[in-house]
Amino acid sequence: MRLTEIPPTAGLPPRLADLLAPRRDLASAMSAQLGTPTALVTCSGTAALMLALRVARQRQPRRDTVVVPAFTCPLVAVAVHALGLRLRIVDLAHGSFDLDPDALRAQLDDRVLAVVPTHLGGRVTDVDAVNRMVADSGIVVIEDAAQSLGATSGGRSIGLAGDVGFFSLAAGKGLSTWEGGVAIARDPAWLEAMQALQNSLPALAAFERRRCIELVGYTLFYRPLPMRWAYGTPLRRALKRGDLVGAIGDRFPPDVPLHRMGDWRQGVGATASRRLPEFLDERRACALARIERLRAIPGVEAYSDRPGERGVWPVLLVRMDSERQRDAVLDRLWTSGLGVSRMFIHALPDYSELRDIVPRQHCPNAVDLAARSLTISNSPWLGNGDFEVICRVIETS
Ligand SMILES: *Cc1c(COP(=O)(O)O)cnc(C)c1O
């Protein structure tokens, strides 16, 4: 039996020294790295989305509906609901993470406040296509780049083509402060308005202390040996119960905590962020080589960048020929400790937890992607030998 567990995504390995480093300002570290004049640090990616939606609502009080992809993080639906806004979903285009243009057009009317094109799994989505469709309508475009910190399009950070973009600093998502988020915008007025709202939030000192302890825990445990216990044991337990949604941690309480991230955690994130560009380059080189290996397997599709895009590589996202084949691979690998998992279990309408929030809309491409896809961790701890084991299982399932 293996004694180690490869984390399911390539989070930047934290270092104990990050916890002890002198205080640094995370917003300026992020804006320098992303090439923007300013950035806003929030307590989570979801909080950044909620602040952006609240500013949008101040500007467009008669609009109350948010359009999101049918395949995305359930927290996005929870956040829209928590603000008292209505949710509409749009199917993905066939074979990509872009919103299907016809399905999107069909959902746009004068109730729509915002559209949330989403850069899933490090890949870059076509935001310009969404911009063209909503041009001059008053609809706001918020880029969900939660999983794609560091990705660029046309040489510029993603998150700047729409009105606001946000990244997540949650556990396992690239750079992490255990929980956290970063928002950027072309027009600094957006961030100023979001900041004004954030300044009125409570500091929640006790809650922030808990987050600090959790970040210490993350720093100690986010490595292959302790991950076996901290991540692998609950994963295997949930799968044994048949609780797939619990297995990937996709079940969320209806209340999203909103507060400000404390200075200490910001400093830890800022210190770690100095290793991020080099880390992303290494992960990219590794991913591009492994994508080629995967693509040589008949019936396997592996997502990559299109011209002009330079995504990041937390995972390799693979789509198999059939659900049966995908499930056969997961039966052999999900509990193996090799970092093979799923991105989201369902398309949004298929989560029973979201029954009262998500409209029952037909979204065949999202349902199909949920049924046929799996993720392979691009963590630096997944060695070539282990990757080859994964490839052999895929070849023979
Ligand atoms: C994780 C995630 C979010 C939420 O980010 P948090 O920082 O966890 O609040 C939003 N959208 C997508 C696509 C995500 O993967």
Image: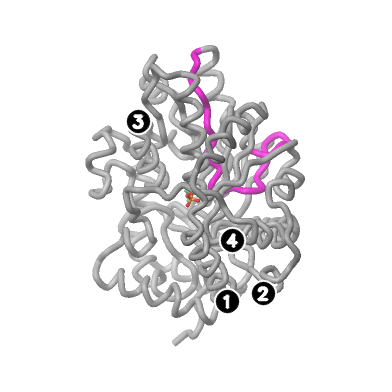
Q: Is residue 274 left or right of residue 184?
A: right
- Label 2 CB sits under 8 Å from any ligand 1 atom: no
Is disc 1 placed on a helix, strand or loop?
helix
Question: Which of the two labelled residues, at mark 2 and mark 1, occupies the earlier sequence position?
Answer: 2
Nearer the observer, 184 or 109: 184
Q: CA distance from mark 4 to mark 2?
A: 35 Å
Residue denoted by label 4: 293
Q: Residues within 10 Å of mark 1 (few under 14, many from 20)?
A: some
Nearer the observer, 338 or 141: 141
Q: CA distance from mark 3 to mark 1?
A: 39 Å
Residue denoted by label 1: 220
Query: Against 229, is 130 above or below?
Result: above
User: Are discs 2 and 1 less than 8 Å apart at CB?
Assistant: yes
Is 139 magenta? The answer is yes
Q: Residue at x 72, y 52 (%)?
A: 25
Q: Residue at x 41, y 71 (%)?
A: 333
The circle on residue 16 is 2
Q: CA distance from mark 2 to mark 1?
A: 7 Å
Question: Which of the two labelled residues, at mark 3 and mark 2, occupies the earlier sequence position?
Answer: 2
Q: Residues within 10 Å of mark 2 (few under 14, many from 20)?
A: few
| Viewer can see residue 303 | no
- Residue 169 percent location from the top left of the image: 57, 54
User: Are discs 3 and 2 less than 8 Å apart at CB?
Assistant: no
The span picked out in magenta is: 137-158
Is disc 3 placed on a helix, strand or loop?
loop
> Can you tell which of label 4 and label 2 is closer to the viewer?
2
Nearer the observer, 397 or 333: 333
